[in-house]
Amino acid sequence: MMTPDFRSSPAPKPQRDYLTEKGAEELAEIIRSAWAKCGHSPRVWVEHCLQMLGERSGGAIFQVRSDLVSGVPTRATTALVAHEAAHPWLSDI
């Protein structure tokens, strides 16, 4: 199975806050895009997970969730994507 290369490159990257809703959505899209390039479509979504109190009163923390198991798509997801590709008319039902 082809897998995306998520290793860091030696080039410096801008700091990103993946705990904000916007940052978590960006990270989810990075994950979706990387796996799509390898022919997979894992389910990836963002959830609100914590409301901060005190210094960051009102600050929310978000997390990225997926159906990846140990970082790779499950057979069920891979089979579903293959089935949908072979039967595109099913998505219209």
Image (tube, grey):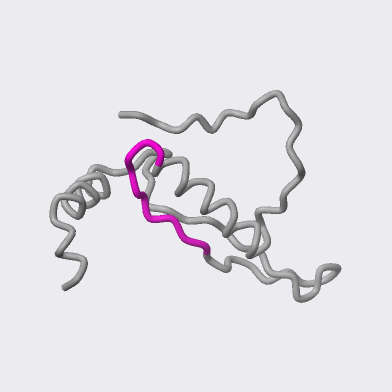
Q: In the displayed structure, does residue 4 sit left or right of residue 11?
A: left
Q: In the displayed structure, does residue 88 sit left or right of residue 47?
A: left
- Above or below, 89 relative to 72: below
Tell me which secondary structure the magenta stretch mostly adopts.
loop
Q: Position of residue 49 (x, y in %)?
A: 58, 66
Quarter of the figure with residue 93 = bottom left
Q: Quadrant of the N terminus?
A: top left
Quarter of the figure with residue 56 = bottom right
Range drawn in magenta: 37-46
Viewer-closest of 67 and 4: 4
Numbered-mark total: 0
Viewer-closest of 53 and 65: 65
Query: Is residue 60 covered in magenta?
Result: no
Seen as rendered, the residue at the extreme right is: 55
- Above or below, 34 relative to 87: above
Q: Residue at x 77, y 72 (%)?
A: 53
Q: Residue at x 40, y 31 (%)?
A: 3
Q: In the displayed structure, does residue 90 sit left or right of residue 17?
A: left
Q: Position of residue 59 (x, y in %)?
A: 74, 70
Seen as rendered, the residue at the extreme top is: 10
Q: Position of residue 23 (x, y in %)?
A: 65, 57
Q: Position of residue 9 (x, y in %)?
A: 65, 26
Q: In the displayed structure, does residue 66 sit left or right of residue 82?
A: right
Seen as rendered, the residue at the extreme bottom is: 58
Viewer-closest of 6 and 71: 6
Q: Residue at x 73, y 69 (%)?
A: 52
